[in-house]
Amino acid sequence: MSEPVPHAAAVRCFDTLDEVSAAVAREFVALARDAIAAKGRCTVALTGGTTPRRMYRLLGAEPLRSEVCWRRVHLFFGDERAVAPTHPDSNYGMVRDALLDAIDIPPHNVHRMPAERADLDAAAAAYEAELADVFGRAAQGSPPRFDVVLLGMGEDGHTASLFPGTPALAERSRWVVGVEAAGVATRRMTLTLPVLNNAAHVWILVSGAAKRQALRQVLAGDGEHGRLPAAFIRPASGELTWFVDRAAAAGVTG
Ligand code: 6PG
């Protein structure tokens, strides 16, 4: 697997997570407006975790809620834990509570990852088929191109459910794979680098001092130790933007 290399990326630093959330929400409204004007729809891969929750809530409330034509937006998920959508650890459940229940989006435009199924490989294949259908691609052909992929980053540099040293991180042909519990809290399902790096825009939201070391390593392209999964996020023909707060960026950015 090739070493990650520094990638031209924009780093937008804000004093607080609230300010990060407001900035990402505003950018989302603008991006959705432009994508819908250009193509009639906007395709999004949402991140889980806790960092994006405030941003999702802002998009689900006025004034921003009414500025998005939700019936023309398709929401997918970058990853999901192998739990029911009603489980407190469910990324879908977090997004449903923070955003989906507040917006008028057609149910068929929300593409939940069925990671709770016993056969994780079959569930991943089913999600690939759903991606192929919505994007009009042949499954495992050229990857779908999202208008925007939202990501977070863990303290170990993982992103989506791509964890250091795992087969999922090394996957270069399948679009969606299952992730066994080894080394991670639970079994999961995740989009792979071929999909994430094919997006028109990738936004990585990072908050808190606990992420500082990983953020510093990834932004420095620290090859020797740079096997941090987030360092492999390098959109081939898209734009990567880090939205970080000062607690995470202290000593990393100017
Ligand atoms: C998940 C996420 C994961 C998350 C990071 C950061 O399923 O947990 O997809 O990649 O973005 O772990 O999580 P926090 O935002 O909670 O710090």
Image: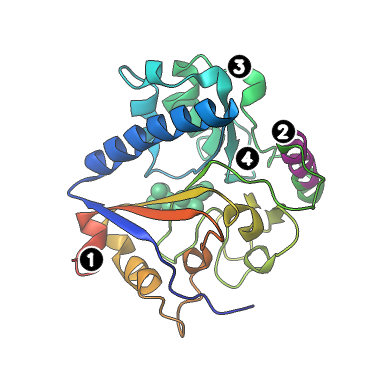
Q: Which mark is residue 83?
A: 4
Is label 2 in contact with label 4 (beta carbons under 8 Å)?
A: no
Q: CA distance from mark 1 to mark 3?
A: 41 Å
Between discs 2 and 4, the one toward the N terminus: 4
Compared to residue 58, the image places residue 9 above or below, namely below
The residue labelled by disc 3 is 106
Tell which residue pokes out farthest to the front in this image.
Answer: 38
Compared to residue 220, the image places residue 244 above or below, namely above
Quadrant for residue 164, please give it.
bottom right
Front in this rendered view, residue 232 or 102: 232
One can see residue 9 in this view? yes
Residue at image point 66% right, 62% down = 168
Quadrant of the rendering where the N terminus is positioned? bottom right
Highlighted range, magenta: 125-134
Front in this rendered view, residue 4 or 81: 4
The residue labelled by disc 1 is 253
